[in-house]
Image (spheres, coloured by chain):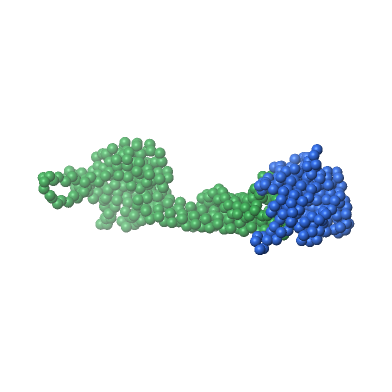
Chain colours: A green, B blue
């Protein structure tokens, strides 16, 4: 291999301009590869974070209980309708053991018990229908990044406090420190004779998560107050989980459903279009990366065809000394690999620098980039390896043709 | 030592036909020749007589259509490509009319090129021999010069050193002085004779130049694909 390396290097060095241009071409291909990877992966991460960042990745809830229908006689035929769950909201009474099971499962980051219920938030004459989320104060920020999204006040879910979305606050015309009345639409207990419960609460914080449905309709209160409000003596409505890998949510949900006998749904079920969109984006990204590799391969192959043609007499003379076909083949494949290696490493470096510059140039006043490029997601190692493979594969045909050159014909010509 | 042992080349009834059917052209019509170790033999004849074809067959660069060929005692006609490469590397050196040096390499690198046909790396012994040969051809001060920087005569002398670096039994030279002026031509021929004598290498030289042929031990004349003398 020393001979092959020596000859390959000498050929590259002696045709400096051609080799330099070729390596630059490979570098440009790798820059395109890494830039597209950094941009598309950055966009994908940002979209996923935006959507999956503030919602539960897996939600565990009790199966809806359907009343049993009794037939009067096994011989008779009857038409009947079943209207499910109209009286009692199902709750997870064994939620503490469910939490234990969930938190032991590999990949589950956090599990939060919550009481959910519909209610009305009122101030003066104005009232707005809301979804009340009762959560333990220490878990208030575990699912949606409420604390980070506060625009006024603080995330204080003590007894008698409520934290609301900014659109809801605007609709009600309330600010931090204002008192509001929270009334449950109905209690969980059908035996409650006193009608829906009501509580006066103080607005402690106002947030903007950027998700209209949450900013407009959600009110956070503490778990105990929510249980009291909705008449749940023991148990919770749902358990929300965050997982380490959002794309593994479906797998984890299936395992959790089997382990807990609860109904498990995922953020992917609710965002099927996002998944489709991200897949389409990944396909587009892969196509562009594929084309950049193809460009590299075509460049290397065409340059080596020229090199083989130029070195025809050299090949003939080397073969006449007894240098084997294998050595000739390896010499030209090595040329391709050297071009690929050098061009790819330089290209990866340039790509890293370029994406960093782009990121810096696109920073807005808030410090967030306007272009979702993420230099850390440039797939530099993959780009180098694939460019190297593309160069090597592209070199095989010209190298094989070089090895098949008839020494006599080459010398005579 | 038998007569066969001393013969580095034994060609018997070599036939070469190019093309097939009506287009077939027979270039060699049963050529037989032997060359002994250390012999200095000229091959003369008019253009198109088949000299270069015969030399190419002897050099195992071209397969004959018929006949038998032994190089350094080894029957080479049945050998496959890799074995033929080894035969060329170990037993045959080439000197061509147009020197055919690798222009991007230095004089000594060119001389050492054949070593890589048999060895993965060049050891000290070969480097010493390459230096010695370049000194003998009068290029001790041009060892590290690129081939592209040498004159025609110098290039041909490097080619002679290259042909001898593996200590072959037979050197085939096709018009080795055809591209040189008279002075350089005489110088190269003197060198070939001297090296043949010192190294015990047989030289088989194809030439148009009668003055070169006359300085050889033996002259073979090729006419219309046959040796006539």
**A326 vs B62, nearest the viewer:** B62
Closest to the observer, B25 or A339: B25
The residue closer to the viewer here, B164 or A60, is B164
Q: Which residue is drawn at 32% across and 38% down?
A: A259
The quadrant of the rendering that contains the N terminus of chain A is top right
Say above or below: A67 vs A279: above
Residue A2: x %, y % from top left = 69, 44
What residue sits 23% from the left and 45% below the top? A65
Kindly indicate the quadrant of the structure image that contains residue B223.
bottom right
Out of A108 and B40, give the one closest to the viewer: B40
Q: Where is residue A345 in the image (x, y as percent from the top left)?
A: 60, 50
Q: Quadrant of the C terminus of chain A?
A: bottom right
Q: Quadrant of residue A16?
A: bottom right
- Can residue A238 be seen at all in this image of the molecule? no
Q: Residue A213 appears at what percent x and percent y?
A: 34, 55
Residue B134 shown left or right of residue A150 in the figure: right
Farthest-out residue, bottom:
B22
Please state if B15 lies on the left or on the right of A357 as rendered.
Answer: right
Q: Is residue A53 left or right of residue B147?
A: left
Residue at the location (72% across, 54% down)? B15
Q: Which residue is at 53% across, 50% downward?
A: A379
């Amino acid at each position: 291999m020393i001979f092959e390396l020596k000859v390959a290097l000498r050929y590259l060095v002696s045709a400096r301009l051609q080799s330099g241009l070729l390596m630059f071409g490979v570098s440009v291909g790798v820059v395109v590869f890494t830039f597209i990877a950094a941009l598309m992966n950055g966009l994908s991460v940002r979209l996923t974070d935006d959507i999956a960042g503030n919602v539960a990745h897996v939600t565990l809830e009790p199966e809806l209980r359907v009343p049993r229908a009794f037939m009067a006689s096994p011989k008779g035929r009857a038409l009947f309708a079943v209207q499910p769950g109209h009286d009692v909201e199902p709750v997870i009474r064994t939620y503490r053991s469910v939490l234990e099971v969930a938190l032991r499962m590999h990949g589950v980051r956090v599990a939060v018990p919550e009481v959910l219920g519909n209610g009305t938030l009122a101030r003066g004459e104005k009232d707005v229908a809301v979804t009340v989320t009762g959560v333990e104060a220490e878990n208030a920020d575990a699912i949606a990044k409420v604390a980070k999204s506060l625009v006024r006040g603080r995330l204080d879910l003590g007894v008698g406090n409520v934290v609301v979305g900014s659109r809801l606050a605007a609709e009600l015309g309330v600010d931090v420190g204002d008192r509001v009345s929270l009334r449950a639409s109905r209690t969980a207990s059908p035996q409650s004779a006193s009608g829906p419960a009501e509580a006066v609460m103080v607005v402690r914080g106002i947030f903007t998560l950027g998700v209209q449905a949450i900013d407009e309709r959600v009110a956070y209160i503490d778990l105990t107050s929510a249980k009291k409000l909705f008449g749940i003596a023991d148990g919770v409505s749902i358990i929300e989980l965050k997982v380490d890998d959002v794309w593994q949510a479906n797998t984890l949900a299936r395992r959790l459903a089997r382990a807990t006998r609860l109904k498990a749904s995922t953020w992917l079920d609710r965002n099927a279009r996002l998944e489709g969109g991200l897949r389409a984006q990944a396909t587009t990204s892969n196509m562009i990366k594929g084309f950049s590799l193809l460009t590299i391969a075509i460049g290397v192959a065409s340059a080596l065809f020229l090199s083989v043609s130029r070195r025809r007499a050299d090949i003939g003379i080397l073969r006449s000394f007894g240098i084997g076909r294998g050595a000739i083949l390896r010499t030209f494949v090595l040329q391709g690999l050297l071009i690929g290696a050098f061009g790819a490493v330089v290209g990866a470096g340039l790509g890293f620098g370029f994406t960093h510059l782009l990121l810096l140039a696109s920073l807005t006043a808030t410090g967030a980039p306007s272009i979702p490029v993420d230099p850390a997601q440039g797939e530099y190692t993959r780009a180098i390896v694939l460019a190297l493979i593309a160069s090597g594969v592209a070199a095989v045909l010209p190298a094989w043709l070089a090895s098949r050159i008839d020494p006599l014909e080459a010398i005579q010509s | 030592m038998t007569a066969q042992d001393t013969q580095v080349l034994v060609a018997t009834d070599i036939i070469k036909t190019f093309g097939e059917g009506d287009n077939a052209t027979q270039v060699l019509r049963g050529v037989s020749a032997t060359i002994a170790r250390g012999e200095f033999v000229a091959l003369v004849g008019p253009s198109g007589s088949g000299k270069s074809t015969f030399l190419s067959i002897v050099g195992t660069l071209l397969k004959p259509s018929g006949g038998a060929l032994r190089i350094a005692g080894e029957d080479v006609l049945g050998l496959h490509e890799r074995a033929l490469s080894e035969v060329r590397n170990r037993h045959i050196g080439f000197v061509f009319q147009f020197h055919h040096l690798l222009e991007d390499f230095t004089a000594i690198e060119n001389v050492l090129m054949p070593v890589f046909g048999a060895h993965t790396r060049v050891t000290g012994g070969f480097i010493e021999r390459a230096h010695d040969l370049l000194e003998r051809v009068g290029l001790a001060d041009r060892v590290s010069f690129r081939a592209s920087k040498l004159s025609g005569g110098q290039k041909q002398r490097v080619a002679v050193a290259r042909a001898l670096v593996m200590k072959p039994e037979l050197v085939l030279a096709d018009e080795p002085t055809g591209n040189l002026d008279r002075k350089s031509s005489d110088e190269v021929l003197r060198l070939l004779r001297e090296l043949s004598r010192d190294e015990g290498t047989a030289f088989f030289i194809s030439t148009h130049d009668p003055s070169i042929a006359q300085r050889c031990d033996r002259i073979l004349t090729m006419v219309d694909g046959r040796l006539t003398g």
